[in-house]
Image (tube, rainbow, N blue to C red):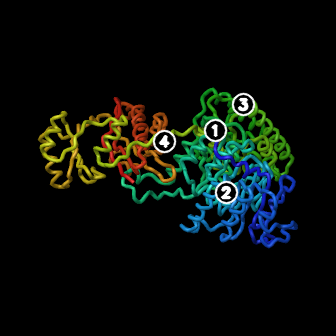
Amino acid sequence: MGRDLTPLFDPASVAVVGASDDPAKYGHAVASQALRAPGRRPVHLVNRRGGTVLGRTAATSLSAIGEPVELVVISVPAAGFEAAVDEALACGAKAIVAITAGFAEAGPAGLARQRTVADRVRAAGAVLVGPNCLGIADNTTELYLASDRFAPGGIALLSQSGNLALELQLRGEPYGLGFSRFVSLGNQADVTLVDLVEDCARHRATSAIAVYAEDFGDGRAFAAAAAAAGKPVVLLTAGRGSASARSAQSHTGALTTSADVVSAACRDAGVELVRTPREMTVVLAALAAGPRTAGRRTAVFTDGGGHGAVAADAAEDAGLDVPELGARTQERLRSVLWEQSSVGNPVDLAGMGEQRPLSYADTVGELLAGDEVDAVLMTGYFGGYAASDGGLGGGAAGGSVLAEGETRAAKEIVAHLAAVPKPLVVQSMYPRSASCRVLAEAGVPVFSATEDAARALAAMTGRAASGRGGGPLPPLPPAAAPLRDPGYHAVRAVLADAGVPFPAAREVTDEAGLLAAAAEFEGPYVLKALHLLHKSDAGGVALRLADRAALLAAYREMRARLGAPAYSVEAMADLTDGVELIVGVNRDPRFGPVAMVGLGGVLTETLRDVAFALAPVPAGRAEELLRGLRSAALLDGVRGRPAVAVAAAAGVVERITAAAAAHPEIAELEVNPLLVRPDGALALDARAVLH
């Protein structure tokens, strides 16, 4: 059930320690907000000098109040913080909101102080938000302990930035967005982002959770909480840059960036990942609107070719499909449009709206009714006739007639949507017009920018469109016995024990061992120099050695050139009709093991055709990743080549990623190449890097 945060969001009483009449002090702002609902619960103001604050008598200390206080806000200088916490706990506080700064963000000494305070709070059975936070608010319980007001609504906003929270409120206002709760995360010394996501998931008045976070703490736990939330989670984060780990020693490590890890975690957890406050507002507005669907087949509907072409591109950029409409749907559209209208997709009125505004509604009705259409993006001039300047009519007599017709069309669009509920998003040059207001008030998202409309529609469609997260994340397997030897054959053994198939191989250190190994299986052979991380780059791999003589010659040449202490003799795999893949796992400090699959072989880093997911990766998810590669057509056969066994490859991916996840001591593990042929999959090389 998670931690009980009731004393934090619905306390029986509140005290503000550090309340002040000085507008320059944060204790003034919080105290002013706390007094907005004096009838809901007792609110006590504490100032060590006593006197009055905001016209009310201030207690000189918490103990001077003379009665228990359930929630205490502390906004005092850092030197007095610990004493204030101790007094709060002694007075029975079950929740503390710590505004005071100067702890983990100030360096190691501050972090040590912060940990000591958090331990003290937990030992007392209380909870602590912060320190170094800007307060909290809960509109559903009339708890106002932040410096600013938040319009009431259904969004829980959890943010590490106060200014970004204010920007989100300002941007959300035109869309009627409001907030059930606001929590400034601060340093998360005790109450974490995960605790808050879990609590907001249980909060009935919260319909969506918006997060701005730079520090996830336990990122995997955040992903798991979001996946289980049962309501949409939208994430804006910083630090997703492209710099890969400087210490990476494998292709997997070199190709895995912070952005890849966060994106993979969000996809797996069903979290909507956004890049800017504007995009977050767009997504939240979409999620607060009408119906959602798992399908992404989108009809673009316009009254001008330019708008239609731009919107179609924006839709595809947002991950939507814009297929050509089938003959039956086109026939129905032609029955309500005139001859010059385009009905392929985009659907273009081609000026008919000026002659008959109701053609907008007729077209939307036919598109919504089509079985091959999952969602509709309407773009262009709609709203212009009812705009205050009369639109194209310019105030002439015909302008008012068109305006009336357009408003009536808007009402009919709403009726069509009620009869056939599918996602509908509108981009208009006149988003504040009367006809667009009719749509917006009925729950149709209306935007002025095409890219915003496309992004909104993407949030209403696809895998996470149900708003119920991405389903439970695969659990981490129990830790296996640690791998002590990261050598090639030891790594192969770990993977082979997990069910990963390899060609026959033997490790040798001299010519006698080489010939003995060659006698165990038929050629052709492969010879690999061991203890070289990138054997191919160093010329440490010889392929297609036809017989023992060729194997011995290659061994002598390689040993003279490289001087490696050990070598591997292997059966040469049949590469005919095969596709080489790469499967790797990189252990991220926040999100744990992260898997990468993609096109493999020696061109892995050049092609960079890879996809990511949290490990372990179930076979079904692995097949989705493989099918989503840019080069996925190779798997189904091209230019007369047969299709390869993708399901078999996905099963091997599951076993590789599960094995890596069971070994927390492995920083990077990689199988490259994983050869996939029509008859199955075979791992041809493996490497591991220990922490």
Foreground pick, 522 / 480: 480
Front label number (3 vs 2): 2
Q: Residues within 10 Å of mark 3 (few under 14, many from 20)?
A: some
Q: Pick whichever, 8 or 283, lies toward us.
A: 8
Instruction: Check the picture and name the quadrant holding the C terminus.
Output: bottom left
Q: Quadrant of the N terminus?
A: top right
Q: Residues within 10 Å of mark 1 (few under 14, many from 20)?
A: some
Separation of marks 4 and 3 at Cα, in angstroms: 42 Å
Left or right: residue 594 versus residue 206 is left
Q: Amino acid at mark 2?
A: Val
Q: CA distance from mark 3 to mark 2?
A: 46 Å
Q: Residue at x 62, y 37 (%)?
A: 298
Q: Give residue 420's mark.
A: 3
Q: Nearer the viewer, residue 340 or 248?
A: 248
Q: Nearer the viewer, mark 1 or mark 4?
A: 4
Which mark sits nearer the N-terminus, 4 or 2? Answer: 2
Position of residue 361 measured from the top left corner of the image (x, y, whole percent): 75, 36
Which of the labelled discs sits on residue 129, or is there none?
A: 2
The residue at which mark 4 appears reads as: 476
Q: Is residue 261 above or below residue 131?
A: above
Q: Amino acid at mark 1?
A: Arg
